[in-house]
Amino acid sequence: VDLTQLTLLRGILIYTLLICLSYFLKRSCVLQFFANFLGVFWMRSCSAYDRAAIKFRGVDADINFSLEDYEDDLKQ
């Protein structure tokens, strides 16, 4: 996950400490697993935000990912 991309994601408040931590973890070969885990957590959080925004505001909601990724949620 690119750190510059993370600051653009809606619904997720990213603290400076987490950004510094993920930068450090990405530079360490031993701790690469933890950096991947943090990336998955942020992406899942953004996805959960998108689902809630679509449910609350409909298809006009500002979301992080493509609306096509949430076709199953639109059917409900």
Image (cartoon, rainbow, N blue to C red):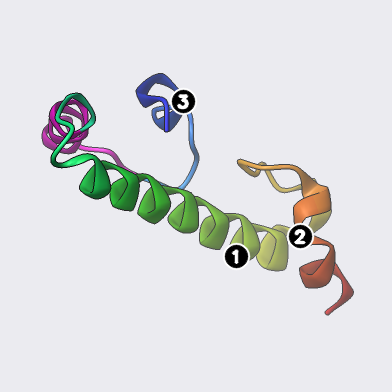
- The amino acid on which the numbered mark 2 sits, given as a three-letter code, is Tyr
Q: Which residues are magenta?
A: 13-25
Q: The C terminus appears in which quarter of the rendering?
A: bottom right
Q: Is residue 16 magenta?
A: yes
Q: Is residue 68 left or right of residue 10?
A: right
**Hey, which quadrant is residue 27 in on the image?**
top left
Tell which residue pokes out farthest to the top in this image: 4
Q: Considering the numbered disc 1 on the image, is that residue within a helix, a strand or a loop?
A: helix
**What number is the disc on residue 5?**
3
Which callout, 1 or 2, points at the residue further toward the start of the chain?
1
Please provide percent x and percent y for residue 33. 25, 48
Which callout, 1 or 3, points at the residue further toward the start of the chain?
3
Question: 6 or 54: which is nearer to us?
Answer: 6
Residue at the spot x=47%, y=49% of the render?
Answer: 43
**What number is the disc on residue 52?**
1
**Hey, which quadrant is residue 58 in on the image?**
bottom right
